[in-house]
Amino acid sequence: MSARSLLETAAVDLQFTALRHHLLYQGTAVSHGEAASWRGSLPVLARDLADAGLGRVEVLLEHRLPLSSKRTDVVLAGVHPRTSRPSYLVVELKQWSRVTPWPDSTTLFDVDGARYRPSLHPSLQVRHYADYLRDFTLALGPARASLSGVAYLHNASDDGVAPLLASPEGIEAAPLYTGARRGRWLEFLAEHFADESGADAADLLLTSKIGPSKQLLAHAAAEIRDREQFQLLDEQEIAYRMVVEAVRRGRGASTKTAVIVTGGPGSGKSVIALSLLGQLWREGRSALHATGSRSFTQTLRKVAGHRSRETQQLFRYFNQFMDAIPNDLDVLVLDEAHRIRETSVDRYTRKEIRDRARPQIDELLAASRVPVFLLDEHQVVRPGESGTVDLIRKRAAALGIEVEHVDLNGQFRAGGSQVYVEWVLGLLGLEIVPGVGEVVHGEDDTGGAALPATWRGDDRYGLAVADSPHQLEAFLRDRLADGDSARITAGYCWPWSDPTPSGGLVPDVRIGEWSRPWNVKADRSVGDAPPSHLWATEPGGFEQVGCVYTAQGFEYDWNGLILGPDLVWRTDHWVAQREESRDPAFRGRNAVDAATFDRLIRNIYKVLLTRGMKGTVLYSTDPETQEMLRAVAPSLG
């Protein structure tokens, strides 16, 4: 709506009610604090635009960033007074009146009543929003439109927020205006907009095609050299800066700080990891990256370390720090830390090291001055994986190590669709316990198993149920022909053969007349089939079916998932069938008890369901489960 219309409707509270209903429809709950912020800030902005003679500028409230659940406060859309081209201004509205610097930082601040503690400089925050919007919105190409960011603290005096105005990094990122500088603020607005209707510019932005996501692995090599490959937003940037500041504090000091970063699939943990690694490496710090995933580590070595043996050595495994010199590293970035195991000892461990082995968590905490743990507790899928926030905190406390924790609440995988992620949790009968971070089985008011909710749709994400694996594959091949990436995954419910003597893969995954081989077991390709660790990223991977061990940690545009007989729907609840699993990790009843198997198998399918960036197509081999899926999600047709 125009600034003039906003001013009129805000006066009678109509716009705030409509905005709350719109966000609820998108699956975003609105807190009382957010609603109060709208009432405190939007009428002020509308009045300022009117006083600047810009009542026809369009005001896009709570504009959602592409492929993300993040929202900007306001995007102003209009016509540039000099070029006559579309002009956009991302505005970060703050009702702050007083801030104090965060210790040892010029970009983090302590603000009474703020949502985050510490809070990021608002100029940096809005600069990242603007850059991210430019990266993913084709209509904002360099020759097509003007786009800038600005922070507006309308309740503040210059004295109250003096630390913000004194921050060189903040002011260089984007302008910041206080209520005391209202005259300059109105002049700034007039420099960006003419007194013309902004309706066409708003339509251009809202209907623009979204450019392809900058896939983490495709740009990892450039990321090591140039951190600007990715824009870190809000908590991502806070986590990044907290680690950088901890490193600077810890150099030459006797104190240690462990930083925990938690977040769901696609919330940006691995982007933070690479951003940190690249920045610290360029600063000459001793920093390494480690995971518990062979596929993920090998792929990073190949892509990020392309033609660079030195870069490849930056990527290690959790079990390679058994005999590391304590604090020999400045930083150890531990990606997918939920895969930390009880011990690093295996059959290849030398006896002299085995005899003095410690818990793996203790080895990782000891290896660097600043260990950084990036994890999602809901992706524990194998027996023996023990990485949790509680474990890290307890062991750090026992070792006298301070802990800082940042939670990433944005969704960047699954197209940024929070609606889809929540639907997946409901489908599998899982829910998140607030403040605990554990996945538990949901129950209804009668004590029975919670029924799956019907998919109500999200225009940013596609979901459908295929009638057969043939139809599922044909749909995904069409997406490949359109230039998207796609993969087929399945529960580990079929045998997994070695290649034939002639060098071919055995089509072990058989469903009626349809069959396909699993991905390659080994580190070398078999014909056109890539090695196991490159199944998710190399073009030839589409011709094989992947499992959780090759899909976890990766993403692709379209996800085809075949639910096997290891998890089936019976009347009104899920039944986990251990006897149908071919996974060696679950072989024998002594491997895990029934309750643990049930929890892990649901986690496995939760991981497999959240690999697609644009959409997911489902098929179950079990008739009753397939019938349930058709009842709660649309058919592929």
Image (spheres, rainbow, N blue to C red):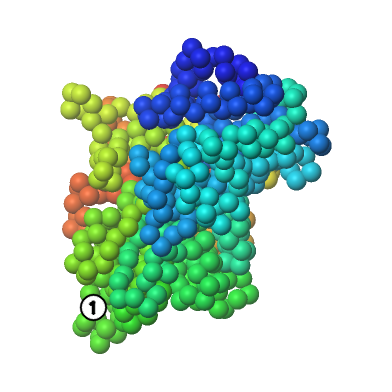
Q: Is residue 549 visible?
A: no
Q: Residue furthest top?
A: 12
Q: Quadrant of the C terminus?
A: top right
Look at mark 1 in the image and give the residue it sits on.
Answer: 357
Between 504 and 310, the residue placed more toward the observer is 310
Element type where label 1 sits in the image: loop
Q: Is residue 169 visible?
A: yes
Kind of residue at disc 1: Ala
Give the image quarter of residue 386: bottom left
Residue 473 placement (x, y as % from top left): 57, 41
**Above or below: residue 341 compared with residue 99:** below
- 401 vs 410: above or below: below
Residue 322 x/y as whole percent: 31, 78
Above or below: residue 229 compared with residue 24: below
Q: Is residue 527 left or right of residue 115?
A: right
Residue in view at x 61 percent, y 16 percent:
5
501 vs 546, nearest the viewer: 546
Q: Mark 1: few, some, or many residues within 10 Å (few <14, many ≥20)?
A: some
Tell which residue pokes out farthest to the right in this image: 83
Residue ID at (39%, 34%): 422
Question: Which quadrant of the view contains residue 56?
Answer: top right
What residue sits 59% from the left and 34% below the top? 182
Please tell me which residue lies in front, 324 or 16.
16
Residue placed at 22% from the left, 49% from the top?
596
Rendering coords of residue 123 (x, y %): 55, 47
